[in-house]
Image (spheres, rainbow, N blue to C red):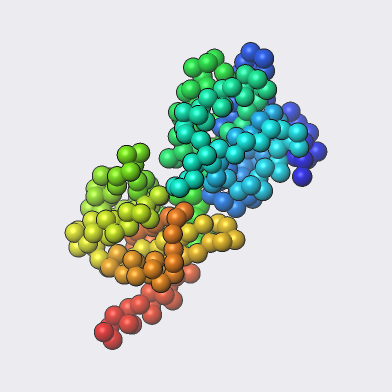
Amino acid sequence: MNSKSTYNSSYSLPFGEGRGGAKVTLVGAGPGDPDLLTLKGVKALAEANVVLYDALANEEIMNHAPLDAIKIFVGKRKGCHEYSQDQINQLIVDNALTYGHVVRLKGGDPFIFGRGSEEIEYAESFGIPTFVVPGISSAIAVPAYQGISLTKRGTSESFWVITGTTSDRNMSNDIALAAQSSATVVILMGMSKLSQIVSLFQKESKGEIPVAIIQNGTTANEKMGVGTIDTIEEVVAEKNLSSPAIIVIGEVVKECNKLKGFYEEFVAAEIKS
C-alpha cells in the first residue's frame, strides 16, 4: 500500500526544513503489531524520502512509505548489529542532507531504551530540524495484550521499567532496588540475566512473587510462560522462551483474569506437595 493515496494532507514539521529540505523525524513503530503504529507515524512515513528502520520494527509498517523512498535496514538486536550506533547517526545526517526527509523508524518508543535522544542530538548538531513521533512502548503494551495491568488499585501503586542489560553488558543495579519495593517490575532485555534477577528477588524473600515472560509480544509469534520467581527458570526451559522478551514481576500477574486458572492450579499443586 502506498499511504500517500490514503493520507492526502501534507505532513510538515512545525519549524520547517533545514538546508536542502533536510529534516529528520524519529518515529516509534510500537511493540510489534503493525496496527499499533500511530496515525502520526503513518503520515510521517508517507512523506519520507529515506527510511532507516530497526530490526524491532515490523516490516509491514514499511508499506506506509512511498514506493520510491530509499529504505535502509540498520537493525540492532542482540547478535544482529548491521551498523554501529555511530554509523547510524552518520547515515541519518548524510541521507537528510542528500535526500531531504529522513524517517528513523525504531521499535517501541524511541526514547525508551532506544537511544533516540542520541540520534536527535547528533542530527541537530548539524543544524538539521528534528521531530519526534512517540511510539507505544512494549513495556506497557505487551503485558496489556495479555490482560496484565501494571498498576491496579489495591495491588500495585507503581511500576518500574528497567533495562536488564546496560551498555557495558552488565545487569542494571536498579533491579536490586526494584526487588525491595512492592511495585510491579518490568524488565526489558533481561533474558540473559534471568538467573541473576531470580537470585536478587529470592534474596528479598520474594520467591512466591508471580512472574510472566512474554516473547515476541503483540505479534503472531507471541509465546508466554507464567510462574513464580522460584519456578520461572524451569518454565522458560520447558517453553523454550528466549529474546526478545519482556519480564513482568509482581502480584498484578496473578490478578490478570486470563491467568487466574493457572494460579488456581499452581496453588493446588503446592498444597498437595
Q: Is residue 155 visible?
A: no
Q: Residue furthest right?
A: 5
Q: Nearer the viewer, residue 153 or 1?
A: 1
Left or right: residue 250 compared with residue 58: left
Residue at 47%, 23% in the rendered image: 121
Q: Is residue 73 visible?
A: yes
Residue at 62%, 24% in the rendered image: 95
Q: Residue furthest bottom?
A: 272
**x, y percent for residue 244:** 46, 53
**x, y percent for residue 267:** 32, 78
**x, y percent for residue 255:** 40, 66
Q: Quadrant of the C terminus?
A: bottom left
Residue at 69%, 28% in the rendered image: 49
Res 1 → quadrant? top right
- Tally the numbered discs: 0
Say if 220 sits above or below 25 in the image: below
Say if 112 sits above or below 239 in the image: above
